[in-house]
C-alpha cells in the first residue's frame, strides 16, 4: 500500500518540502523544466554553441555547388591565357624573323647551314639576338617555349615552316652543294597570302629540329589520315609518330600559328590540311 501523510501533518512547518515517501531517502530536487530542455537539446537544433550536423551539411553542399560552377570557368580562363601567351611568343619570333629578312636583302633566315656532315647557324640560335637575349643564351628558355607544352619537352616547342625545293618558306642551305635542293630560305617577295611562318610543333624523332614539314615538299605530301576524320593530314614518309607533319595541336584539338602578315591564329589540323595557301608560295 502506498504510504500517506497523517492528516494532521503541518506542511508549512517543514518549509513546504514534501517528505520522501520512502523512509530514509530524501526527495529529489525539483528542476526547472525549461532549463532542462534547453540543456538537453534535440536533433537538428543548436545548443548554446557550435554547428549542428544539418547546418554543416548545408554549408558543404553550397560550397560544392559553387566549385562546380566556378571551376570550369577558371579552367577555361587558364586555357585562354595559355593561348594568348603562346600567340605572344610566336608573334615576337615572327617579328624577329621578318626583321632578319629585312636585313638580309629580303630573304628569311635559313634553317641551318650545311657543310659535309656538319650543321651550323641554326635559326633558333640566331633569332635570340633579335629577342634581346645575350649571345649564347638559349632562345628556347623564354619565348621559344609554349606554356601548353609538356614540361618534359626540350626548350624548342615551336617550329618554322620547312620545305625543300622551289615552293619552300624556310629551308636548309647547302654550302658545298651536297644537297642541290637545299637552296636556303625563301625571299619575302616570293610569298603572299596566309602563309604560316611558325606554329606549335614537335618532332618526337628529332626534338631539337624546331620545324614542321610543309606538304609542298615533294618528300612530305599528305597521304595519311592520322586522326580518322576522313581528311588526309600527314605524310606517310614521316611515320605514324610524326603525325600532322610534326604540327602539334596542343591547345585542345588546335594549334597556334603566326602568318606572313604577323597575325596569330588558333587553327585546327583539318583547316591547315585542307588549305594549301597556308603551306607555302603558290606554284609559278
Image (spheres, rainbow, N blue to C red):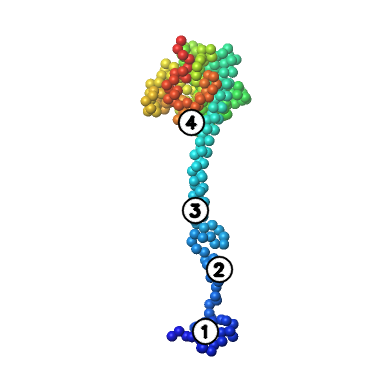
Q: Residue at x 59, y 26 (%)?
A: 137
Residue 207 shows in the view: no
Most foreground residue, 188 or 203: 188
Position of the N terminus, as image quadrant, is: bottom left
Q: What's the distance in space between the residues labelled 2 and 3, CA to CA?
A: 28 Å
Label at residue 35: 2
Q: Which mark is residue 251?
A: 4
Query: Which residue is identified by label 3?
Result: 57
Dots 2, 4 in contact, CB < 8 A: no
Q: Residues within 10 Å of mark 1 (few under 14, many from 20)?
A: few
For the residues labelled 1 and 3, say whether their Cβ atoms are less than 8 Å apart: no
* Residue appearing at x 57%, y 81% in the figure: 16
Q: Earlier in the sequence, mark 2 or mark 4?
A: 2
| Sequence order check, earlier mark of 1 and 4 | 1
Tag 3 and tag 4, C-beta contact below 8 Å? no
The Cα atoms of the two marked residues, 2 and 4, are separated by 66 Å
Viewer can see residue 30: yes
Measure the alpha-carbon separation of dots 1 and 4.
Answer: 89 Å
Q: Which residue is mark 1?
A: 24
Extreme top residue here? Answer: 284
Q: Is residue 45 above or below residue 264?
A: below
- The mark lying in front, picked from 1 and 2, is 2
Residue sitting at 58 percent across and 12 percent down?
A: 105
Q: Quick one: label 2 or label 3, which is nearer the N terminus?
A: 2
Percent position (x, y) of residue 54? 49, 56
Amino acid at each position: 500500500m502506498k504510504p500517506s501523510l497523517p492528516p494532521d501533518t503541518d506542511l508549512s512547518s517543514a518549509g513546504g518540502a514534501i517528505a520522501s515517501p520512502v523512509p530514509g531517502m530524501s526527495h529529489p530536487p525539483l528542476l526547472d523544466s525549461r532549463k532542462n530542455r534547453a540543456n538537453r537539446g534535440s536533433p537538428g537544433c543548436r545548443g548554446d554553441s557550435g554547428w549542428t550536423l544539418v547546418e554543416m551539411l548545408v554549408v558543404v553542399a553550397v560550397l560544392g555547388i559553387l566549385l562546380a560552377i566556378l571551376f570550369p570557368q577558371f579552367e577555361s580562363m587558364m586555357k585562354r591565357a595559355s593561348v594568348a601567351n603562346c600567340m605572344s611568343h610566336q608573334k615576337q619570333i615572327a617579328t624577329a624573323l621578318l626583321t632578319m629578312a629585312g636585313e638580309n636583302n629580303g630573304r628569311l633566315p635559313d634553317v641551318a647551314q650545311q657543310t659535309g656532315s656538319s650543321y651550323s647557324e641554326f635559326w633558333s640560335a640566331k633569332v635570340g639576338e633579335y629577342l634581346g637575349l645575350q649571345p649564347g643564351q638559349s632562345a628556347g628558355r623564354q619565348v621559344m617555349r609554349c606554356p601548353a607544352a609538356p614540361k618534359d619537352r626540350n626548350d624548342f616547342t615551336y617550329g618554322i615552316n620547312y620545305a625543300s625545293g622551289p615552293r619552300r618558306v624556310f629551308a636548309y642551305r647547302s654550302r658545298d652543294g651536297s644537297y642541290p635542293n637545299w637552296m636556303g630560305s625563301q625571299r619575302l617577295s616570293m610569298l603572299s597570302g596566309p602563309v604560316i611562318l611558325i606554329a606549335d610543333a614537335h618532332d618526337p624523332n628529332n626534338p631539337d629540329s624546331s620545324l614542321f614539314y610543309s606538304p609542298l615538299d615533294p618528300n612530305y605530301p599528305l597521304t595519311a589520315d592520322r586522326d580518322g576524320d576522313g581528311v588526309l593530314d600527314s605524310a606517310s614518309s614521316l611515320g605514324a609518330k610524326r603525325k600532322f607533319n610534326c604540327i602539334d595541336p596542343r591547345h585542345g584539338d588546335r594549334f597556334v600559328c603566326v602568318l606572313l602578315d604577323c597575325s596569330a591564329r588558333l587553327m585546327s589540323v583539318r583547316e591547315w590540311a585542307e588549305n594549301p595557301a597556308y603551306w607555302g608560295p603558290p606554284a609559278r
